[in-house]
Amino acid sequence: MRLGHSVGAAITRQRELGPAESVIMLWGAAMLLGVAGIAVVWPKVIAYPIAGLAIWVTASLLVRAVELRRRGKAKASRAPDEKY
């Protein structure tokens, strides 16, 4: 968790980082370099999980959109026409 917060703060410059976060930043850089290296050597190892995540998020968004639309239609059919 702390790694993500420190790297995010460094990228967005939301707050001042101190010397203690330098080790965390180095580990974050090393991990990102590792992911980049894997992507260069084996692109499918990176592409398949990203595609799976995109499909998962898409399905979730579609389900929520359908639920919201149904709720809106049900609410509209139950509510009397009132004007303020």
Image (tube, rainbow, N blue to C red):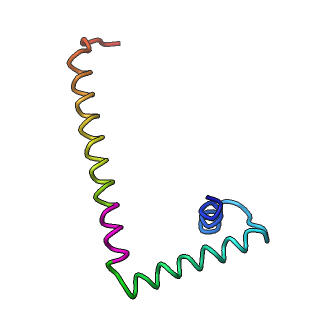
* Residue 34, position as x, y percentages in the image: 51, 81
* Residue 13, position as x, y percentages in the image: 65, 65
Residue 46: image quadrant is bottom left
- Of 10 and 29, which appears nearest the observer? 29
Residue at image point 28% right, 58% down: 55
Q: In the rendered image, which quarter contains the N terminus? A: bottom right
* Residue 82, position as x, y percentages in the image: 29, 11
Q: Could you tell whether 27 is left or right of 81 in the image? A: right
Q: Could you tell whether 12 is left or right of 77 in the image? A: right
Please give the range of residues in magenta: 45-53
Residue 26: image quadrant is bottom right
Residue at image point 21% right, 26% down: 73
Q: Could you tell whether 16 is left or right of 54 in the image? A: right
* Residue 11, position as x, y percentages in the image: 60, 68
Residue at image point 23% right, 30% down: 70
Q: Is residue 14 magenta?
A: no
